[in-house]
Amino acid sequence: MIFGYNSIMKLILGLVVVSVILNASWKDLSLEERRDWVVRHFGKFEAERLERMNLLEDDWLFEGRQPESLNVRIVGRWPFGPTFEVTGDTLRNLVFQGSGSGVRILDISNMPNVNELSRIAAPYAGLIRGLAIKDTILVVLQGADGFSVYGITNAANPNELARIFIGQWLNDCVIQDSLLYIAGDDSLRIYNLKDPRNPVFVGGCAVAALGIYVQGSYAYLVYQNYLRIYDISNPANPVLVGTWPGGVDCRTVWVSDTVAYIGTYNDGLQIINVANVSSPFKITDYPCGDTRGLFMLESPIKFLYLPDHDDLRILDVSNPANPQLVDSIRTPGWAWDVWVTKEAGSGSYIFLGDHYEGLGIYDSNQPSNLQWLYQYGEADAAKYLAVSGNYAYLADHNGGLKIFDITDPSMIKEVGQWDTSIVNGTVTVDGVAIRGTIAFTRGWFGGVGGATLTSFDVSDPSNPNLLDTVKIKATDEANVVLSDTIAYVAATWVQAVDVSNPTQLETLGSCRAANYVSWGLFILDSLLYVAQVDSGLTICNFADPTAPYRLSSYVPGYAFWDVFVVDTLAYIAGGGTGLHILSITDPLSIYEINNHSVSGSACAVFVKDTLAYVGADYMTVLNVSNIHNIQTVGYYGVSSSYRGPLYVDSNFIYSANYSSGFTIFEYSSGPGVTEIASSKPKQSLRFQNPVTKQVLSIKGITSPLKVSIYSITGQKISYQEIRPERSSVSFNNLPSGVYFLLFERSGWREVKKVILFIKERR
């Protein structure tokens, strides 16, 4: 794949979905034919916008794409996090729990006991936002990414059949017959799954939707202030036939016969008559809170199951004009989605997607007397990660301390856990550091009345053993860091803890660092560097750990999310301003040397040898061997998912991704750009490199060529045509940096990397 063609996706996130099928492949159309096609289906304004951005020349503009990457690939993922989605199959006694960016497949044939059959690590990092089943096919929808299709004939061994990367925010999905309907922030998309190994885009339309329900020939979509009804009798061209402008914040929808039930954000359950789809009207409403999912059973009574943030409710809606509460029960977490086996009697169970409390399981044998049984699937939230040898140690918030065998990074195995549920009171594990066979965690321990540092013996990874815990002042997001026999923690205060005897932890001195939250910590010699978001960088002197003091601060006006120190340089993850390099030679006189932008918000940084690894929307690798000329040498990106804390060992990058579990990347240095093989001879192109002028003369041209200029992040900047008699490429006043030139003619393409270095005039 030629560099940049995948990367175009970032430029067209606002592009409306293709609403008709192309008569021919987009790649086979001429520029004039492409423009005419866009004008016909999207209008002249959209065609002019694409033309200005040179996007009509992109062969993949309306084709399937893959995540953008350069020299970085995902080798392993442990994907689990909060539960937003749950569905099931009563015929096969299966429940599917969407957890983070993964799926647990559960056997419920021996209830009330649940048996986990298998796990799916969905291919992208986006959270699971939809699950849909059709016979032995499971569709998994992921947030800002796309969807995957799995064969579940053998539920103990699901196999991926297909994946489609879309790159837009996707919110809900349903399957009817062989068609998959996807509701997104920008569109309704319809795919044919007749051949599940090859989903085919059928059609769609531009509409924003958070929830979707399909009944007969109509699709019902809700978004914020409205319900919209589309005639989908011709799925290639959905037609809007009716709208209910409710004026309430609509989130989810369920339709039964001629009635639509709409869950809202704190505006109550809206009950709408849709007998005449062209003129829907409100019947009544029912007061309730934030409702993101609905489920209905209709035999023998019409029961609507309604997760209501803090509650699970059952409503009898046999008379839609007068819904009656059957029962309600408080839920441990944020009730989000629900699936039910049957209404009443033996074998009646409710499975509740309970956000950070996993999957709630309830006995509904008597619907008027709901009974909570237990929570299944830990409340995972991967906050920090430490690596030692063949093991990774994860601070998993409510999920406790988890230990993984990473001998084979592509086959991550969970081997041990210290479960917070075994302790009375609120307990979390929110930071972790490892030394030898001892792990130190920062978190919250209700038993000692607040924030704590805890030590564990992990000599047997399958059975971590708590050694001691001590109360500390740190309550914020910063990790715990170690130096010799001292552990350091931070909030508005920073504190030292003597860990020389792990069985008897002892707090030492502390000092006030700032008036704001602490996120990043780094200890070098006796100086503790604290990244404190809007409070900048604070340096505290711990030469005497019993009497530390605040040495200096640097507050330049941008956010400090993380810090990594090498010798006299501090590398700062500066949020939306990218990576910053500061001189700390004199801690009392800190100044910035250079900065480099990255895709999205830089929230984590790790430096090893000549490379800086930055966790942002993309996992980004920068060459900092020359701090005055920072170069991007690698990245991997799909969605805003790689901002978590980092650890780097050899070529492997370990990233804690909070709600999406943790990911292992591999960075392999190389050109990152591949050439398309051609039977035609290549032209021997020659030019000065580095480029010191805005106009570059190309030698060796024997025929007309198209030239596209791409930024280091893959953004297409300009398109030009050159020929032997006019062989200059203009950089159009671009700033100094690394760029890629794509030269092409029929049957031949070649990519050249260039360094543009324009001296500033004084």
Image: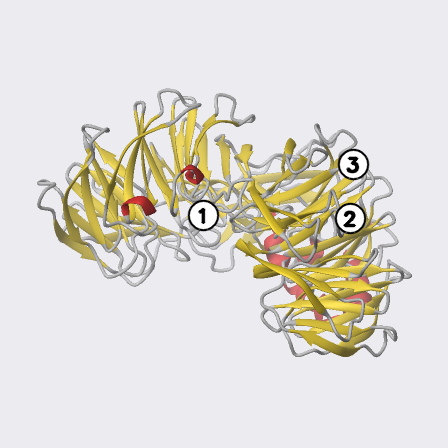
Residue at 73% x, 61% y is 304
The residue that label 2 is drawn on is 27
Residue 36 shows in the view = no
User: How much space separates mark 3 and mark 2, taking CA atoms?
Assistant: 44 Å
Q: Amino acid at mark 1?
A: Arg
The residue that label 1 is drawn on is 643
Relative to 622, 355 lies left or right:
right
Q: Amino acid at mark 3?
A: Arg
The residue that label 3 is drawn on is 92
User: How much space separates mark 3 and mark 1, taking CA atoms?
Assistant: 39 Å
Residue at 43% x, 22% y is 390
Q: Percent x, y for residue 290?
A: 58, 65
Residue 254 drawn above or below residue 61: below
Residue 599 drawn above or below residue 121: below
Q: Identify the element where label 2 is drawn.
A: helix
Q: Residue furthest right?
A: 233
Relative to 576, 675 lies left or right:
right
Q: Identify the element where label 1 is drawn.
A: loop
Q: Earlier along the polypeptide chain: callout 1 or callout 2?
A: 2
Q: Percent x, y for residue 425?
A: 38, 46
